[in-house]
Each structure stands twice: as structure tokens, then as C-alpha cells.
Image (spheres, helix red, strand yellow):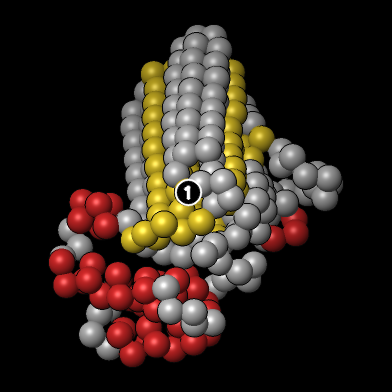
Amino acid sequence: MSIDATARIDPSAQIENGVSIGPWSIIGPNVSIGAGTVIESSVVIRCNTRIGKNNHIYQFSSVGEDPADKKFAGEETWLEIGDNNILREGVNLHRGTGVSGGLTTLGDGNLLMPYVHIAHDCRVGSNTVFANNTGISGHVEVGDWAILGGLTGVNQFLKIGAHAMVGGMTHITNDVPAYTIVSGSPAAVRAVNVIGLERRGFDKQTILKIREAFKIIFLRNNSLQEAIEQIRVLRQECDALQILIDSLEASEKGIHR
């Protein structure tokens, strides 16, 4: 364990072996930090935050701060961060509010580039990438392997599906289905995220089935429910389509088209 003499650690904090905490960082009450995690200089971990193993949090990040929401009345809420995440300079993640279970979560293996904002009550999966200055509003859900380009803004209560990609400077106002690329102003679905799927080992036949499902949703004038029923038939030949079906069925705000 390496803790700089200028760091301030609350007596209630639980710091495992192998943690490094840099100069002038502040670790508040009810914080736990797993083995191998590196906290650089001038990081504030406010309170009620559980951080897993082998994370790297860079300077000037604000983690586990009070939610920026008028509904918050000082109730006990939490932030949970998994393992092997990289939080670059100036990232901030807020705890939940009492409205939605009081919890904000970040999974494993995520990369949050400088000045990313994760608001209260968000649920971010694993292996995602958030480029510089991306911000997601409260109660947003982001699926595994999603990529959000720089300066992306996501409205509250929306869902970004697994393996989706959002282009830079895009304002997301509806749900983004799994496997799709969304970009532009106004935002629109452009294509299947083929390159991303290939990089993650999806075979050609699976990608072909996902492309067929894309046509059913976006090119054939089907209602969303009609599209889901037709994709269920394709699902018998391709297990990966279940992720897409789940993404479509979970939409409460309507999808981008």
C-alpha cells in the first residue's frame, strides 16, 4: 500500500493492500477500494462508494459525489464501481437518489476519457468506452461494449443497447437499439456496428442475421412490435438476436430510427 502523506483518508474507509493514493487526494466516509487500484493526485472520493480491484483513477476526478438532482434530500445512496476500469482526468460519477433504489453502477473494464460525466442512478455495463466530454443524464442505462463518441449528450431515462456506437457530438433523445450506429443532428440510426462486432469475434453468419434484423426494423415500415415478432423467428437461427430483442422490448421512450 502506498498512501501519500498529504492524502486525507476517513477512518471508516477500507483500503485493501496494493492500493496507491496520490498527493492531496481525499477519501471520504464509507468508501472501500479494492487491491491494485491506483488513485492519482487531487482525486475526491466523496462518500458511500465501493470501488473494485485494479482500477486507475486519474487526477481531478470526482467520484461518489452527491447527485445533482433537486429530488435528493440527503438520503443514504451509493456508487458501485467494478474492476479494471480507467477513469481519466476530470471524470465525475454521482451517487444515486432515493427515487430509483439509491444506486449508480459502473461495471468492469470501462474506459472513461477526460471530463466524462455519469449522473445519478445510471447503470453502465462493462467494456464500454466514453470519449472526451461525454455526458449521460440521470437514470440512463448503457449496455456492455457500447461506445459513445466525444461530446455526446444523452437525455435522462434512456437506454443505449449493447454493442451500439454513438457518433461524436450526437444528442440522444430516444433509446438506441443494440448493435446499431447512431449519429448526426438530429440523431438517426445509420447502420449495424459491423466493425465493432468483427473486432469482438462475431462470425460472418451472425453479422448477416443481425443485418437482416436491421432491415426488418428500419427498412420495411414495420411497427416496432411487428419487427420484434419477425426477429423472434430469426432468433431460432441466431442466439445473438436475443440481445437485440431484449433491447427493443426494454424501450420505454421509443427508439431512434
Residue 132 picture location, percent across and down: 48, 30
Type of amino acid under label 1: Ser
Q: In this view, does 217 lie above or below 194?
A: below
The structure residue drawn at horizontal position 40% and vertical position 42%, both measured from the top left corner, is 129
Residue 162 picture location, percent across and down: 40, 60
Q: In this view, does 13 lie above or below 174?
A: above
Of residues 147 and 224, the one nearer the viewer is 224
The structure residue drawn at horizontal position 57% and vertical position 71%, both measured from the top left corner, is 251
Q: In this view, does 44 lie to the left or right of 246?
A: right
Residue located beneath label 1 in the image: 183
Q: Is residue 206 left or right of residue 74?
A: left
For numbered disc 1, what is the local secondary structure? strand
- Sort mark 1 into few (<14), some (14-19) or many (20+) by Cα contacts within 10 Å: many
The structure residue drawn at horizontal position 53% and vertical position 79%, both measured from the top left corner, is 224
For the N terminus, the image quarter is top left
Of residues 149 and 71, the one nearer the viewer is 149
Residue 201 picture location, percent across and down: 18, 58
Residue 40, by quadrant, is top left
Q: Is residue 43 above or below residue 73?
A: above
Residue 54, by quadrant, is top left
